């Protein structure tokens, strides 16, 4: 697959000399992105907003994706939309001050890929449905009832 290599690896070093509250929004729009250690998306778009804090940066990630899914009722394949919004804290100091802060490496590069992969697939439903009112399959003949009723359903309706 032809895709950018490590697109979510960003040099955040430029933020160290910026005033507290300075922010920079980085937009992403990718087609068919395969996370190296995880899931595959049909489309993946969103933003990483980097905000200078007192000790480092706050990264706010907002991403939407479409992923291949199979409906649990009618068993048809469909594109499941996923959306996630989360944030991470990073510090420029050598030791992180709190447990939920990560240290920014000396070269200034942070790779947000793993976090985006984890968070976006957390949104994947346990029971994906092609549409909320999917009619599913006939228990007797297996007809996809979204396409139309089968004789069993029709009979039931007239009983
Ligand atoms: Zn369905
Ligand atoms: Zn039937």
Image (cartoon, rainbow, N blue to C red):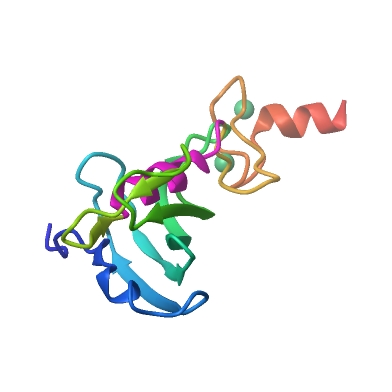
Q: In this view, does 136 lie above or below 36?
A: above
Q: Decide which of 148, 133 is in the foreground and name it.
A: 133
Image quarter in which the C terminus is found = top right
**Whether residue 69 is situated above or below residue 61 in the rendered picture:** above
Q: Can residue 34 be seen in this view?
A: yes
Q: Which residue is drawn at 33% across and 78% down?
A: 17
Q: On the rendering, which quadrant does ligand 1 occupy?
A: top right
Q: Position of residue 14 (x, y in %)?
A: 28, 76
Q: Residue at horizontal 19%, vertical 45%?
A: 36
Chief SS of the magenta region: helix
Up/down of 131 relative to 44, above or below: above
Could you tell me which quadrant the N terminus lies in? bottom left
Where 90 falls versus 14 (above or below)? Answer: above
Stretch of the chain drawn in magenta: 112-126
Q: Nearer the viewer, residue 75 or 108?
A: 108
Residue 131 on the magenta span? no
Residue at (28% x, 66% y) in the render: 31
């Amino acid at each position: 697959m032809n895709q950018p290599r490590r697109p979510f690896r960003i040099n955040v070093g430029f933020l160290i000399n910026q005033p507290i509250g300075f922010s920079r929004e980085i937009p992403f729009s990718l087609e068919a992105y395969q996370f190296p250690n995880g899931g595959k998306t049909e489309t993946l778009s969103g933003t990483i907003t980097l905000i200078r804090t007192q000790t480092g940066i706050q990264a706010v990630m907002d991403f939407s994706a479409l992923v291949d899914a199979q409906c649990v009722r009618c068993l048809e394949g469909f594109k499941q939309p996923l959306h996630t919004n989360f944030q991470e804290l990073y510090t420029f100091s050598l030791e992180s001050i709190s447990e939920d802060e990560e240290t920014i490496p000396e070269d200034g590069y942070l790779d947000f890929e793993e976090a985006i992969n984890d968070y976006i697939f957390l949104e994947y439903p346990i029971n994906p449905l092609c549409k909320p009112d999917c009619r599913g399959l006939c228990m007797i003949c297996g007809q996809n009832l979204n396409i139309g009723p089968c004789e069993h359903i029709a009979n039931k309706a007239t009983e």
